[in-house]
Image: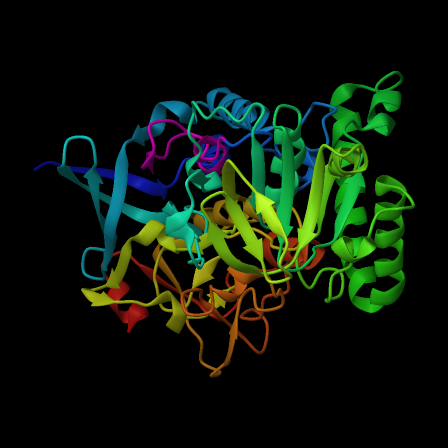
Amino acid sequence: MTTQHVDVLIIGAGISGVGVACRLRREFPGRTFAILERREQLGGTWDLFRYPGIRSDSDMFTFGFEFRPWDDLKVLADGTSIRGYIGATAREYGVDRDIRYGLKVVSADWSSEQQQWTVTALHEASGETQTWTCGFLVTATGYYDYDNGYLPSFPGEETFEGQRIHPQHWPEDLDYAGKKVVVIGSGATAVTLVPAMADQAAHVTMLQRSPSYVFSLPALDKISAFLKRFLPDSLVFRMTRRRNIVLQRAIFKASRRWPKPVRKLLLAGVRRGVGPDFDMTHFSPRYNPWDERLCAVPDGDLFEVLRDGRASVATDTIETFTPTGIRLASGQELEADIVVTATGLNVQVLGGAAISVDGEARNLHDVLTYKSVLLEGIPNLMWVFGYTNASWTLKVDLAGAYLVRLLSHMDATGQAVAVAVDRGDNANGDGIVDELSAGYIQRTKHVMPRQGREHPWHVLMDYKHDSKVLLTEPVDDGILQFAPARVASDAVA
């Protein structure tokens, strides 16, 4: 078995892995690196999910990369457009040639003696195992299980005679024309599926246990379209990105500070969309805005299909599946030929890979995050995790820029190893995403890294704060410990 070595190894060729790789290629053209991707093409989430209408749930101007801004007027882009954007970015920076497909990373072990990672990857098509070594490891695998979506058990589900589908595993040949469809869920996937399927289905019902906040965004950015008449495109889209970053954060902070007025504003928008006779209890959540992510719909497409009767909403619990549909606790019967269980994700860190240091297993739940990009006590490893209260890629951009700063500092000072060490007993038991109450977030409590009481161990999910921390604060802050070649074990100890 041959071992392949690179300076930097990235796990995952989704938007996170490609984003970090492009920054490395731009700043370190002489460095060797590779991206290991389990799937057979790049795109990550945007290659996996193929259900009708799939689109971003964040505006594309902040979801796009800072170094290559989104240059289309679509605000919430479809999955095909996003895959195209990721691929074009990879080709522009030449990182597409460094992706190795079909490789599932099984384990990664840091050797203090050799000052490098040894990564074991399984080529799933052939069953062969590959070994890679690297000086620095970057994990950009997202946070959920690609094999299995979250699927709770339902009473009587075995009696249902129709089709039951999870959006994570959408059949390419599914024909739902003229059929009755029930979509179980109220999150971003459900509010996308309902209007997308309503064009062909006989009727679509969104069955939710409890409502979510849903608001309408313009499908196209008319302000940018106007500015393009007078200013260069590159300037317009950079301005739009900055504007939306500020607006996004302002809405989040306003929701935290003034939840009642923001709630009133959001519900007023729904009322305008669904009309005066619609039962607003279906869009009146029991929680405050931004206790869970808000669901955006372009040009109110969900409200339109509800208003014209092509779709409906039922807010209730399931008593049992029946051969012909679902019976609710209220006694209402929902007839269905197809049931789509848009019930969420199973959380998984590092793509399921086992991490160890000198042969000793490390459970991420037991470690703190340093500046939300490194992990306590694990040398030369960057953990890329985006925002939960803003566009994911905003944080990816910052993480990539910080990695460039860190590697440049290590080059300039002759260091081979960097590891974050908590000397202040900062752990407080909180997870990094505990501020949100969504089901999939709550299911992360036993797997996600922890956060600490004080900076740099405390996680704020704030782009402005993180920009200062990651882009301007000194790299050598007394908490990061460095070691030159051949004495790395002292730093780890």
Is residue 165 rendered to the left or right of residue 179? left
Residue 276 or 240: which is nearer the viewer? 276
Looking at the image, can residue 135 be seen? Answer: yes
Q: Position of residue 224 (x, y in %)?
A: 83, 26
Residue at 60% x, 62% y is 329
- Residue 18 vs 268, above or below: the answer is above
Residue 5 or 210: which is nearer the viewer? 210
Q: Position of residue 1 (x, y in %)?
A: 7, 37
Number of marks present in the image shown: 0
Looking at the image, can residue 372 be seen? Answer: no
Is residue 85 rendered to the left or right of residue 2? right
Is residue 221 rendered to the left or right of residue 334? right
Residue at 24% x, 67% y is 361
- Residue 91 within the magenta-colored segment of the rendering: no
Q: Position of residue 109 (x, y in %)?
A: 23, 57
Residue 270 or 108: which is nearer the viewer? 270
Image quadrant where residue 54 sits: top right
Q: Position of residue 93 (x, y in %)?
A: 49, 24
Figure quadrant of the C terminus: bottom left
- Residue 35 vs 276, above or below: the answer is above
Among all residues in the image, which is located at the extreme top?
229
Is residue 48 rendered to the left or right of residue 362? right
Task: Give the residues in magenta.
Answer: 28-50
- Residue 47 within the magenta-colored segment of the rendering: yes
- Residue 461 vs 48, above or below: the answer is below
Among all residues in the image, which is located at the extreme left?
1
- Coloration mode: rainbow
Q: Main secondary structure of the magenta part?
A: loop
